[in-house]
Amino acid sequence: FSHQAHAKSGNKCEDCHDKIFKKKTGSADKDNALTMDSLKEGQFCGVCHDGDKAFRSDKECKKCHVKRD
């Protein structure tokens, strides 16, 4: 996840905070809630990444799952 990439796309902090994500590190994945299933159900990143507002989180895997050295 990149805050910078989302800001460059025209998103504002309040688009996600505190409606979708709390401003507390680790709060999105409390009890391991942030899963691909939850995204497909329209939760967390899936609120926007549904193929309409932003790319589909379940179709363009490499946009999020980036291999790091």
Image (cartoon, rainbow, N blue to C red):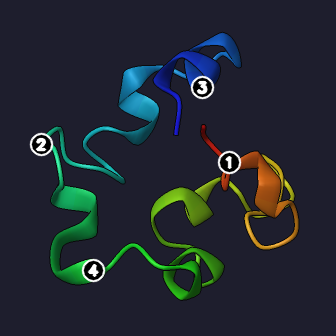
How far is disc 3 from disc 1 in space, using C-alphas?
19 Å
Mark 3 or 1, nearer chain start: 3
Residue 36: x and y, percent? 58, 79
Numbered disc 2: secondary structure: loop
Residue 67 — which label?
A: 1
**Whether label 3 touches label 1, CB < 8 Å:** no
Above or below, comparing residue 55 to residue 23 in the picture: below
**Whether label 3 touches label 2, CB < 8 Å:** no
**Whether label 2 touches label 1, CB < 8 Å:** no
Numbered disc 4: secondary structure: helix
Instruction: List the residue tagged with mark 4.
Output: 32
7 relative to 17 in the view: left or right: right
Q: Quadrant of residue 39?
A: bottom right
Query: Are there few (<14), some (14-19), or many (20+) residues within 10 Å of tag 1?
Result: few
Q: Nearer the viewer, mark 3 or mark 4?
A: 4
Q: Nearer the viewer, mark 2 or mark 4?
A: 4
Look at label 3 and name its amino acid: His
Residue 33: x and y, percent? 31, 80
10 relative to 51 in the view: left or right: left
Instruction: List the residue tagged with mark 2.
Output: 24
